[in-house]
Amino acid sequence: MPDMRRDGRYVDDGPSVPMRAPRAHPKGSAAMSRTPRRPFRRRAGTLLAAGAVLAAAGCGGGVGSAPAPGAAAPVTGDDLADLPTALTEQELSWSACGEAEETQGGDAGTPPPVEESPWECADLTVPLDWDAPEGETLDIALIRSRATGPEAERIGSLIFNFGGPGGSGVVTLPAFGPEYATLHERYDLVSFDPRGVGASSGVVCLDDAELDEWFAAPITPADPGDDGEVAAYTDRLASFANACEERQGDLLPHLTTTDTARDVNLLRHVLGDGRLYYFGVSYGTELGAVTAHLYPERMGRVVLDAVVDPTMTRAESALGQARGFHLALGNFLEDCAGEDDCPLGGDPAEGERVLADLLEGLREEPLPTADPQRPLTQSLAWSGLAQALYSQDFWPFLTEGLDDALDEEEPDGTILRILGDAMNGRSSDGSYSTLQSSFVAINCADSSERYTVEDVRARLPEFREASPVFGEGMAWGMLSCTGWPVEGEAELPTVNAEGAAPMLLIGTTGDPATPYEGTAAMREALGEGVAVELTRQGEGHGAYTGGSRCVSRAVDRYLLDGELPEDGLVCSD
C-alpha cells in the first residue's frame, strides 16, 4: 500500500525522464498498434521502459569552494580501521555487464555484453552486519564507465544513487549516461544496487503472481469507519510483513541507510578516492547526507538533487507528499485545460472531481485493458496517475490514458495500467523488480515510527483536504511499517555534517515527491556553512536531467572546477 516516505518512487524511485527507452519497446502491447487520435500522442509502448527507469534539492561566500582533487585525504583512514584487510584491500574484478536480472527491472536493463560497450560490472564485498565486520558478507552489484577524457584530467569516480529507496543504480545509470556526458569526460561514472536492492540480495517477499494480486487490491478501505473492512486491509499488510520475515528475515535488520552509507564509504576507498564525489537524487539525497554525517572529512564534491526533508516524521512526510502531488496534479490539470481536446474539460477544479469519481468507480468496476486477466483497478490507476506526475514528459501519456479510460463507448484502461506497472516495478514480461519490496524494507529498517489505525483515522480529514485524489491513499500508507519484524533505527535520520566540504543542494518548485521546502530544511540540518541552495522553477522530480541549461551549467562547474554557484541562485529556464 502507498507509503512515499522518501520519493514514492525512484520510479524509483529517480530524475526527470527524457522520454527515451534504454531498451527496445515492449512487444505485444495492444496499445502500441492503436491509431493515435491526437497529433501529440506518442506510442504507449515506450512508456513502460521509460517509466521503469524513473520508476524507480548557506551563506554565499561563507560556504567557500569545493576541495580540489589534489586536496584529498590519504586513501587509508581511521574510518576503515576496524575492517578486515580482505575488505579494505579487495580488488574489483570489472568485466562486461550481462543482461539485467528480473530483480533489477527487465524493461530498463544494463547494456548488452558487447565488446564496444563502455559499461563494466563488478561486485563489492561488504559486511552483512557492520557491527560484526568479520562475519558474513554481502556482494554489492556495481557498474561503471571510465572517464572519456585524458587520464591526466581525470578527477576520480562520481558515485550515483538515483533514489527509491529501492532503485537499481546498475540499471539506471546506463539509461541516463548521455545526460552526464560532460561530467563523464573527467569522472568515471559509477553506480550500484544498494544492499537489499536488485542484484545486491534484493528483497523478494512475494512471487510475481502474488504481487499482481497485491498491487491490484484496493488502496484504502472502502469505509474507514467500518472495523471489518479496516481489519481486512490491515490483515493484508500483516501478510506482506510475515512473508518478508519468512523469506528475508536474516537480511531485514541490515538494510538501514546507515548501513548503505558505510557501504558507500568502503566503495569510495576501494575505488581509490580519498574523498567522495557523489550525486544523489531523491532518496539518494538522504543517503548522501547520512554519509556526510558519518564521514564529514571524506566529503569531496557532493550534489543532492530533489532533496528529502530529513526533519519530517513519516506522517508529516506523507502529508507533505499529498500536498506535493496535489500541486503537481493541479499544474497538469491547468495545462490540460488549455487544450481543446482535454478529456477532463476546461475547468481544472471540475477535472479533479472527474478524476476522483473515476478512481472511486474503479473500486467496484475495474476497466478492461489489452490484457483480459489484468483490468485497471483503483489501485493501479492511482499508482499510474502518481507515476505520470513525476515528470512533465509523461503528461501526454496521462492525457491519452485518461481519454481512453473516460471514453463513454469503449473505455480502456491499458495506458493507465502500464503507468501503474511502471510505478510498481513490473516489467512487460510480468516479472517484478525488487523496487517496492525493497522500498518498504529499507523505510521500515530506518524508521522506528509505527502508527495505528486510530492515528490514520484521526488524520484523514487533514489528508483529504491536502489532496482529494491522493490524500486518503497517502494516509493509509502510514501503516506500511506497522507490524514489521524489524523495530527501525530511529525516528529521524541524523544528517548534521559540520566540517564537511560544501555541498550543492537543488530543489524544484513543482516537485511532487520531494516538495521544494525540503531543500531548505536539509540545508539547515546539515549545519552552518555545509551547503548552498539552488532553485529550479518548474515541474518534475530531479532538476539536472530536466532540461535547464542554468542548472546543468551550475552543477557541471561545481563538480568539474569546484566552483559553487551563488547561494540562492534561481534557474527559470
Image (tube, rainbow, N blue to C red):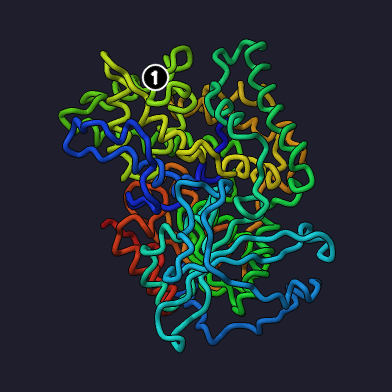
Position in image of residue 361 (x %, y %): 42, 14
Could one spot residue 13 in this view of the protein?
no
Determine the residue positioned at 64% across, 69% down.
267
Position in image of residue 345 (x %, y %): 22, 23
Position in image of residue 484 (x %, y %): 73, 35
Q: Who is closer to the viewer here, 511 or 65?
A: 511
Determine the residue positioned at 75% across, 71% down.
87
Q: Who is closer to the viewer here, 244 or 61?
A: 244
Position in image of residue 382 (x %, y %): 45, 28
Give the position of the N terminus as an image quadrant. Answer: top right
Give the position of the C terminus as an image quadrant. Answer: bottom left
Quadrant hosting residue 387: top left
Q: Look at label 1 and name its amino acid.
A: Pro
Q: Who is closer to the viewer here, 105 or 476?
A: 105
Determine the residue positioned at 55% across, 22% down.
217
Task: Give above or below for 563 relative to 228.
Answer: below
Task: Spot the residue most to the bottom.
Answer: 152
Q: Which element carries disc 1, helix, strand or loop?
A: loop
Q: Who is closer to the viewer here, 67 or 436?
A: 436
Task: Give above or below for 516 relative to 452.
Answer: below
Relative placement, left or right, of 529 versus 484 is left
Task: Give above or below for 125 relative to 443.
Answer: below
**Where is mark 1, residue-wise?**
368
Task: Give above or below for 406 relative to 24.
Answer: above
Tally of marks: 1
